[in-house]
Image (cartoon, rainbow, N blue to C red):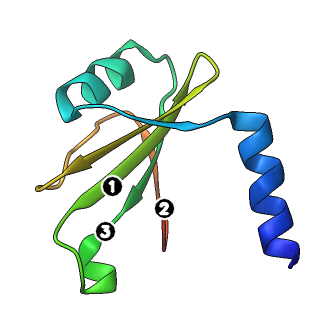
């Protein structure tokens, strides 16, 4: 129950996750001074072949899906077990 409560609190603080196209996601990341990106590697789960990426920009939480791995030089990238 605690993890559900933590997730609800995080959603209340961050707001909804906005799914955008991969090119738009890359544009947003390029605008950021010190980007932090969360990635879900499909190979780690073995089910999906779609990469998921998540970042926060100007108070919004942006999400994209990609059929191939994206590379972000000069960014902090963290791998998540799951992005929901």
SS for dot 3: loop
Q: Disc 3 and disc 2: Cα gap in Å?
A: 10 Å
Q: Return the disc, 1 or 2, that comes first in the chain's sequence.
A: 1
Q: Measuring from the top left, give residue 48's x and y in whole percent.
A: 22, 75
SS class, disc 2: loop
Whether residues under marks 3 and 1 lie with C-beta atoms below 8 angstroms apart, the answer is no
Q: Is residue 28 left or right of residue 65?
A: right
* Horizontal relation, residue 43 to residue 79: left or right: left
Above or below, comparing residue 30 to residue 62 in the picture: above
Marked residue nearer the N-terminal end (3 or 2) = 3
Q: Which residue lies at the image location 49% right of the left edge and 66% below the top edge?
A: 80
Name the residue carrying label 1: 52
Q: Are marks 1 and 2 in contact (CB under 8 Å)?
A: yes
* Quadrant holding the N terminus: bottom right
Residue at screen point 11% across, 55% down: 68
Q: Nearer the viewer, mark 3 or mark 1?
A: 1
- Residue pointed to by mark 2: 83
Viewed as shown, does residue 62 lie left or right of 8? left
Crowd class of label 2 (few under 14; some 14 to 19; many from 20; radius 10 Å): few
Judging from the image, what secondary structure is the residue with disc 1 in?
strand
The CA span between labels 3 and 1 is: 7 Å
Q: Residue at x 41, y 37 (%)?
A: 75
Residue 20, compared with residue 63, is above or below; it is above
Discs 3/2, front: 2
- Of the numbered discs 3 and 1, the one sitting upstream in the chain is 3
Residue 18 percent coordinates (x, y): 46, 34
Residue furthest to the left in view is 68
How much space separates mark 1 and mark 2, taking CA atoms?
A: 7 Å
Q: Which mark is residue 41?
A: 3
Report the residue at 48% width, 61% height from top. Answer: 83
């Amino acid at each position: 129950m605690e993890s559900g409560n933590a997730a609800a609190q995080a959603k209340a603080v961050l707001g909804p996750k906005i799914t955008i196209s991969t090119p738009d996601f890359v544009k947003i990341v390029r605008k950021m001074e010190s980007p932090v990106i969360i990635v879900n590697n499909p190979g780690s789960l073995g089910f999906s072949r779609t990469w998921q990426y998540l970042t926060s920009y100007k108070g919004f939480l942006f999400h994209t899906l990609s059929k191939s791995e994206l590379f972000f030089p000069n960014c902090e990238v963290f791998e998540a077990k799951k992005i929901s």
